[in-house]
Image (cartoon, rainbow, N blue to C red):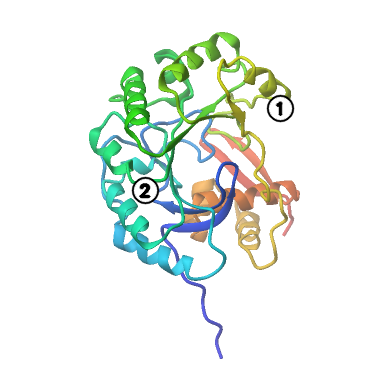
Amino acid sequence: MQSRKPPVYHHVYGPVPSKRLGRSLGVDLVPFKVCTYDCIYCQLGRTTEKSVEPRTYAGAEAICDELARKLSSGAPPDYISLAGSGEPTLNAGLGEVIEKIKGMTDIPLAVLTNGSLLWRDEVRAALAAADLVLPSLDAGDEAMFQRINRPHRDIFFERMIAGLNDFVLSYPGEVWLEVFLLADVTAMPSEIGKIDRLLQRIRPKRVQLNTVTRPPAEAFALAVSADQMEDVKGWFTGDVEIIGQEASGENRILQAGQSYDEIVSLLSRRPCTLEGIVSGLGLSSVEALKHLDALIRMGLVTVVRRQNGLFYRTTVCK
């Protein structure tokens, strides 16, 4: 008798360990690296399609069919998270997806967004039914915004800040705001002061500090050390927390039969970008990164930076 093949998922991935959400079952709403920004620190690499125009990249029915199958097996996750390979608010069906997921399960629903489109009424309305929204704020002024986030030309700093402020005021759930810090760029008192003044105006429920933990899109996007993160924390006037460490369980060695064997096999033939691994093996970007993290710690994979991007290659000889 032939063994039954595992179900194929195009939009749902995980659960994966999350620094902020525990066991997070991900839902990917846009294709790989479709985003409003091209952040210098992005672990997914350079943006391949920079856009501000929403499209129905993934339909609510297809997503919920996959989600129902996934939830029918295994322990329930702590959160269902709309995130993944790009900016989820670029999916024109975001509101319908949230509404349908909320109608099929009591598991809390979180949306991870860069916050760049919150100035749009329809985006704020679509997010209203989510249990938790986690936007980001990486800069305190237009110049730094352009330097770090490299936004689409139609996104201006003050428009983004106004949208974030309006959303926090109107949203009935909690907003946890991530501030992503870079050494010798924003991790200095003058830049933190600018960000802090904005935080006092926006007043999210939580402020969470993060830094680089995976190979970034640009080599000059450097991590803030753990000791300096503690110093930086003291430069904020309000309560902030540091999340820039591995999530509990992220450093577990992967068990036999999981995708790391396929990754090593692929990389033993040729080095690949993250996008190449994702498309070649049918993994989500988040799952691929979790596997690559483990393989790097095991000494089986290393990272090389070339002119045309970041490549992973095996250290194992064939």
101 or 53: nearer the eye? 101
The residue pinned by badge 1 equals 226
Q: Is residue 227 left or right of residue 210?
A: right
Disc 2 residue type (three-letter): Val
Residue 125 visible in the picture: yes
256 or 16: nearer the eye? 16
Asked if 102 appears above or below 227 in the picture, the reply is below
| Extreme residue toward the bottom, this view | 1
Disc 1 residue type (three-letter): Ala
307 or 64: nearer the eye? 64
Looking at the rendered image, the quarter that the C terminus falls into is bottom right
The residue carrying pointer 1 sits among few (fewer than 14), some (14 to 19) or many (20 or more) residues within 10 Å by Cα, namely few
Report x, y in % for residue 279.
47, 55
Identify the secondary structure beneath mark 2. loop
The residue pinned by badge 2 equals 30
18 or 152: nearer the eye? 18
Q: Residue at x 36, y 55 (%)?
A: 102
Displayed quadrant of residue 74: bottom right
Which mark is first along the chain, 2 or 1?
2
Report x, y in % for residue 157.
36, 19
Q: Residue at x 26, y 50 (%)?
A: 56
Looking at the rendered image, the quarter that the N terminus falls into is bottom right
Identify the secondary structure beneath mark 1. helix
Report x, y in % for residue 55.
26, 46
Task: Name the mark nearer the viewer: 1 or 2.
Answer: 1
